[in-house]
Structures are given as structure tokens and as C-alpha cells.
Image (cartoon, rainbow, N blue to C red):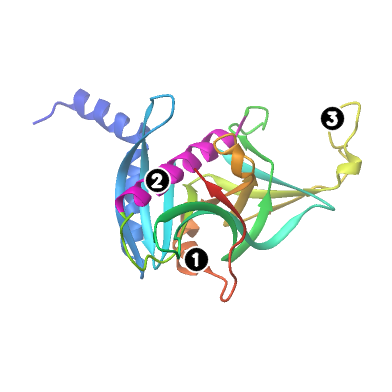
């Protein structure tokens, strides 16, 4: 029998951990038709020698979904949508994919290319993560996004090595996804109204905030500068089932702007 003090300490540790959230995500995915978890806690190593783990790798048909689970307490992820360059209902997604070269070698190679994928979403280059009710305490999403990009790349290299001599290997996009219980919002505003003196939007100006279920976060992360932009899907945990059920390539659309990935 565990004494009350130990039980209390253990329960607090349980509440503070992100692993229970990860196991809840895995449990939910197992109930989604056509989705299979092929890896949990996939180990990979950064070029610096730091050991990392990819939370989940899910396969849906020929699509590989690399998932990072991010539990928060009160974070709000705010994706900026400046008027004039606002991107809504976007299906374009710049992703890594593993494909077989159709020559005598039949070797597998990794490429980064633009794919068209459902479901559509807003797309943003800028995201702030508010960690307090006042909105004054903020951090950036780039660190989390770059980590899942590196993890997805590592898994791509793993597949390339493991399946190098497989014949008839269908092209497999590798889709990095951050699943979080944070609230996801977009902010639509006119950048012309931002004061060049204060750097802020005047109180009299209008900024439209909208709650979203998922969003494409796209930019040239330092994780892979040689291949340009990459897309990371950020998905609300409560909408994960709908996202994965809808996730599929747009029919008859071939990948574009292919860049070889070393």
C-alpha cells in the first residue's frame, strides 16, 4: 500500500508529464479507420549528437505522418494573417517524400516537393505562442516546428536505408504534424495600420480573430535551409480525428518543385 504522501507526489508528477497526453493521442489514433501506428518513441540523433525521440509515426495508405504531441496548460497559438498576403483554404504543402527512381538502379531517394493535400487550411509564416492571460509572455513556435521537421527527416532517412532494395516502392510523403491541446487562432489585420513608431496596432483598428482546427505553418526552417520552405501541420487535439480522416492527396495532382534531399 502506497502512503498518501507518495501517492500525492506521484499524482502531481503524472499531471505534470506530457506522456499521458501522448498515450491518449495514440489511443485515439488506433480507433481511426485506415490509420496505423508504425512507430512509438522512434529514436533519432541530431547532427550535434543529441538523442531525440519522435513521439508517433502513423501510416495512412502511402502517407507517413510524423507526430509530435505538445501538451500545454494555457497556451494560445496565434497565427498571423496580414491582409494582402493572407492565405486561406490552402491545399499546397511542401513536404519531404521518399520515392523510387525508375532506372536500372531502382534506388530510393528523398526529395522535398510541393504536394496538394486535403484538408485545406489557413497558412501562416508567423506564429506567436501566448503563455499568459495578459499576452505579454510569449515564445515562438519555430523551435517545436524545427524539431518535428528534423524528426520527420530522420525517419525518412531510416526508411530509405531500410527499404533500399524494395521493388515497386510507391512514393511516400512524410508529413510533420504537431498535435496540441493549445487553442489555435488566426489574426487577420491590415499591416498598413501598424504604427511605425510603436510597432503596435492602434486600439481603434480592427483585428479579426478566428478559432481554427488546424493550420499550415510554413517557412524555411533552419533545420533544412538547403531545400527552402517546409510545411508543418499544427492540429488541435480535439480535431485530430477529423484531420486524419480527411488527410489525403488531392487527386491527379503530381508533386512540383522537387529538390533532392541529402
Q: Is residue 4 left or right of residue 113?
A: left
In the rendering, at what x and y percent does residue 58 appear?
37, 57
Secondary structure at badge 2 equals helix
Q: CA distance from mark 1 to mark 3?
A: 38 Å
Disc nearer the start of the sequence (2/1): 2
Q: Is residue 100 left or right of residue 135?
A: left
Q: Residues within 10 Å of mark 2 (few under 14, many from 20)?
A: some
Give the magenta part as a residue range.
Answer: 139-162
The residue pinned by badge 2 equals: 157
Q: CA distance from mark 2 to mark 1?
A: 23 Å
The secondary structure making up most of the magenta span is helix
The residue pinned by badge 1 equals: 247
Disc nearer the start of the sequence (2/3): 2
Which residue lies at the image location 48% right of the left edge and 37% below the top edge?
A: 147
Between residue 252 and residue 238, name the one nearer to us.
Answer: 252
Numbered disc in front, either 2 or 1: 2
Q: CA distance from mark 2 to mark 3?
A: 43 Å
The residue pinned by badge 3 equals: 199
Asked if one can make out residue 138 in the rendered structure from this viewpoint, the answer is yes
Amino acid at each position: 500500500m502506497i502512503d498518501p504522501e507518495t501517492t500525492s507526489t506521484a499524482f502531481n508528477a503524472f499531471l505534470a508529464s506530457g506522456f499521458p497526453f501522448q498515450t491518449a493521442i495514440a489511443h485515439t489514433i488506433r480507433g481511426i479507420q485506415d490509420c496505423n501506428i508504425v512507430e512509438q518513441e522512434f529514436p533519432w540523433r541530431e547532427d550535434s549528437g543529441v538523442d531525440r525521440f519522435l513521439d508517433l509515426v502513423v501510416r495512412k495508405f502511402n502517407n507517413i505522418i510524423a507526430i509530435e504531441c505538445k501538451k500545454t496548460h494555457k497556451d494560445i497559438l496565434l497565427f498571423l494573417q496580414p491582409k494582402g498576403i493572407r492565405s486561406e483554404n490552402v491545399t499546397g504543402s511542401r513536404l519531404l517524400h521518399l520515392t523510387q527512381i525508375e532506372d536500372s538502379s531502382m534506388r530510393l531517394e528523398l526529395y522535398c516537393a510541393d504536394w496538394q493535400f486535403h484538408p485545406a487550411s489557413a497558412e501562416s509564416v508567423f506564429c506567436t505562442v501566448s503563455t499568459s492571460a495578459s499576452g505579454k509572455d510569449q515564445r515562438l513556435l519555430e523551435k517545436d516546428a524545427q524539431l518535428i521537421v528534423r524528426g520527420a527527416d530522420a525517419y525518412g532517412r531510416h526508411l530509405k536505408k531500410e527499404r533500399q532494395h524494395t521493388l515497386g516502392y510507391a512514393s511516400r510523403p512524410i508529413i510533420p504534424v504537431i498535435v496540441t491541446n493549445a487553442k489555435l487562432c488566426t489574426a487577420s489585420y491590415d499591416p498598413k495600420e501598424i504604427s511605425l513608431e510603436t510597432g503596435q496596432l492602434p486600439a481603434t483598428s480592427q483585428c479579426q480573430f478566428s478559432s481554427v482546427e488546424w493550420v499550415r505553418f510554413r517557412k524555411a526552417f533552419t533545420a533544412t535551409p538547403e531545400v527552402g520552405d517546409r510545411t508543418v501541420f499544427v492540429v488541435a487535439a480535439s480535431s485530430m480525428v477529423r484531420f486524419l480522416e480527411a488527410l489525403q492527396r488531392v487527386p491527379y495532382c503530381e508533386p512540383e518543385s522537387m529538390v533532392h534531399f541529402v
